[in-house]
């Protein structure tokens, strides 16, 4: 139990075994008036001296899960206990927090505006409690990765293998999104690392190179264009499948073609690589993707890769994270894993460059 100067008690089951020095740290966060008001925007009469620290944990789960039952399951509370905590939050903030809509429970505008600061505050506390060293075999919890492009599939499977072997209790969650969505999620703490083509990042982000690659054309093995050298005319006339995880209507290849005053015919857009593989196997559509992604596609299906009829630029994938996480042991360990995986993928790409392409 932690008591603030005014004598109110703050119970925190999630932080019950905290060393004295860290307890003082949390005590300072909870009882500091300016910090309290900045996080929850409370009036001078309502400050964190009277708030159970677990309410912030419950608030974060409720906004993320959009439901009392799911939020309770996430943090290990019963549905009734979570519902009681929601009632306390509603009284504290004078806001409904969650409201019922046609699509289910949704957070209120105020809850959405508070979600980022509250999550960052919880992360700061968690960081203070985390040992300076990271022991993979002992690591637990979630690690969230956001990807801008399906072509990062060239690196993700190997990361899953490495983490399963070296840190079996660490749970990886992979989301997709646009650049803006990924940056926002990293800012508000929903995402730990981003993978993509990121350029011109704000100063609050750090980045390093993952790997570089070139594009090829992928189609079903018995496609009429698979047994010959692909010409530009055939490429442009063929129906194209565009894989866009962010929902963008075009990609880098369309920009390259536009520079030559050319345009391809996009017949279908899909958000996922697996769906693209199925669609390609059952149609005359073709897709343009990186060699690394093509290698994954062709190994797990009857698809083949052929060279493009034009020179495509070498694209570079990058890892990004917030400067706040620069010294996080877990974040640093995952980054190092990705860098090693990227180096191996590039070496493999050079070795298998000829074997990937279908022989006419």
Image (cartoon, rainbow, N blue to C red):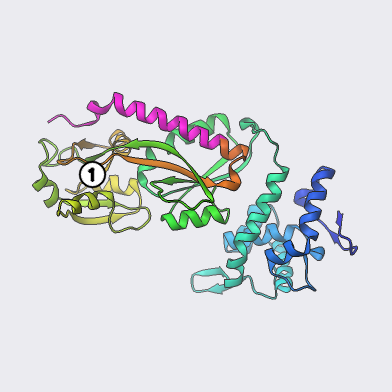
Quadrant for the C terminus in the image:
top left
The residue under the point 42% across, 51% down is 200
Query: Magenta stretch: residue 353 in it?
Result: yes
Query: Magenta stretch: residue 281 in it?
Result: no
In this image, 84 relative to 115: left or right?
A: right
Q: Which residues are magenta?
A: 333-360
In this image, 350 relative to 47: left or right?
A: left
Local secondary structure at mark 1: helix
Q: Residue furthest front?
A: 203
What residue is disc 1 on? 281
Give the tally of numbered discs: 1
Q: Position of residue 192 (x, y in %)?
A: 54, 47
The residue under the point 81% across, 48% down is 23
In this image, 151 relative to 226: left or right?
A: right
- Placement of 200 over or under 111, stated as above or below: above
Q: Position of residue 186 (x, y in %)?
A: 53, 52
Can residue 69 be seen here? The reply is: no
Q: Name the residue nearer the viewer: 312 or 287.
A: 312
The residue under the point 87% across, 63% down is 8
Q: Position of residue 291 (x, y in %)?
A: 29, 36
In this image, 283 relative to 101: left or right?
A: left
Q: Residue furthest bottom?
A: 94
């Amino acid at each position: 139990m932690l008591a603030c100067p005014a004598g109110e008690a703050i119970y925190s089951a999630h932080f019950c075994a905290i060393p004295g020095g860290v307890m003082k740290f949390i005590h300072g966060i909870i009882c500091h008036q300016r910090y309290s008001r900045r996080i929850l925007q409370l009036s001078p009469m309502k400050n964190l001296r009277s708030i159970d620290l677990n309410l912030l944990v419950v608030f974060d789960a409720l906004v993320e899960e959009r439901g009392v039952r799911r939020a309770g399951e996430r943090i290990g509370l019963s549905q009734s206990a979570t519902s009681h905590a929601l009632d306390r939050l509603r009284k504290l903030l004078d806001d409904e927090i969650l409201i019922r809509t046609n699509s289910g429970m949704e957070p209120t505008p105020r809850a959405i505006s508070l979600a980022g600061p509250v999550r960052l505050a919880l992360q700061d506390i968690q960081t203070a409690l985390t040992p300076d060293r990271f022991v993979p075999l002992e690591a637990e919890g979630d690690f969230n990765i956001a990807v801008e492009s399906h072509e990062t599939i060239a690196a993700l499977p190997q990361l899953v293998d490495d983490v399963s072997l070296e840190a079996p209790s660490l749970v990886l969650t992979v989301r997709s999104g646009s650049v803006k969505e990924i940056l926002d999620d990293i800012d508000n703490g929903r995402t730990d690392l981003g993978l993509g083509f990121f350029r011109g990042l704000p100063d609050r982000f750090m980045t390093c190179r993952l790997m570089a690659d070139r594009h090829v054309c992928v189609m079903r093995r018995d496609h009429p264009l698979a047994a010959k050298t692909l010409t530009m005319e055939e490429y442009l006339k063929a129906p194209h499948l565009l894989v866009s995880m962010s929902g963008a209507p075009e990609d880098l290849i369309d920009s390259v073609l536009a520079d030559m005053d050319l345009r391809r015919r996009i017949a279908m857009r899909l958000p996922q690589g697996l769906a693209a593989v199925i669609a390609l196997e059952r149609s005359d559509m073709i897709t343009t993707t990186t060699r690394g992604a093509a290698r994954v596609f062709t190994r797990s299906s009857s698809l083949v890769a052929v060279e493009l009829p034009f020179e495509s630029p070498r694209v570079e994938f990058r890892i990004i994270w917030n400067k706040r996480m620069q010294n996080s042991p877990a974040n640093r360990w995952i980054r190092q894993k990705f860098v090693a995986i990227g180096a191996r993928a590039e070496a493999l790409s050079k070795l298998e460059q000829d074997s990937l392409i279908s022989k006419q």
